[in-house]
Amino acid sequence: MSLSAVNMANANGCEHPNYRGTFVLVHGANHGAWCWRDVRAGLRTAGYQVFTPTLTGLGERSHQLSPDIHLQDHIDDVVNLILSEELENIVLVGHSYGGTVITGVCDALRDHINQVIFLDANTPKNGDATIPNLTPAGVERVLGEPLVDGYQVPPLPPTRLGIAPDDTANIEWLNRRLTPHPIATLSDPLQLRNGGCDDMHRTFILTTQKELLQPFALIRLEELEDDPGWDFRELLVGHDAMITAPCEVTDLLIELVSPENQA
């Protein structure tokens, strides 16, 4: 149990006998901590301590958005959370672009992490960018609109994130919450000095049907499917699985950290 967990259990005489461990959940591009709302609640109800940092310039930190934000800033956001909260033996989860971020966090804080889970997330190697060969012109081709102010990537429509066209409640919620994303964080190459998440207890959860994946993502997925160093799971509920199927995601996360899966 981490020092912070001990303090949580003992501060002011409070008792938390059902404490089961700590999750750190890292969101993807254009999102924020808000996207983990229901998964966070489910994990806490099950007895887990849960942290959901918002990366610089996104979500409720959108007022900090600037062209000077780079991938290392987002890695530092999570590293500093873990250090400042004195967290140990954590389960680190990244969604989408968050997979690049948590790979960098693993590289920096390997000894603090018990398990790492990639939820339909990037799994980059040293020197890889989140989106290979990303350019402003490429963004415009994909989205049909230019960068905002020359450096902000507009969010994809919710239906392209796996939200059903008739799910009007979630479509409206995402349209209210999604924010532009600094392009440099998506094009910066990831610099690893300690092997990233290599040789760690790591799991990839596929939530997008393979035929909908970008070619570079499909190639990487096929690589890790054949890699015995990865546990591979499928939960085909759409890319934004924490929104479309929060109960199923919560249940799977709890299953993955159960004692029988720790061998």
Image (cartoon, rainbow, N blue to C red):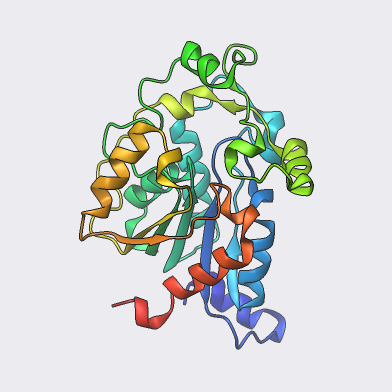
- Name the quadrant containing residue 228: bottom left
Residue at figure coordinates x 68%, y 67% from the top left: 41
In-front residue for pair 155/109 = 155
Residue 28 coordinates in the image, percent (x, y): 54, 42
Residue 262 coordinates in the image, percent (x, y): 34, 76
Residue 207 appears in the figure: yes
- Looking at the rendering, in which quadrant would you find the C terminus? bottom left
Tell me: 52 left or right of 197: right
Image position of 26 with respect to 158: above or below: below
Q: How many marks?
A: 0
- Name the quadrant containing residue 129: top left
- Name the quadrant containing residue 63: top right
Residue 44 coordinates in the image, percent (x, y): 64, 72
Image position of 122 with respect to 201: above or below: above
In-front residue for pair 139/182 = 139
Residue 252 coordinates in the image, percent (x, y): 49, 69
Residue at figure coordinates x 71%, y 81% from the top left: 12
Residue at figure coordinates x 36%, y 20% from the top left: 133
In-front residue for pair 235/25 = 235
Residue at figure coordinates x 53%, y 43% from the top left: 77
Residue 195 appears in the figure: no
Tell me: 166 left or right of 113: right
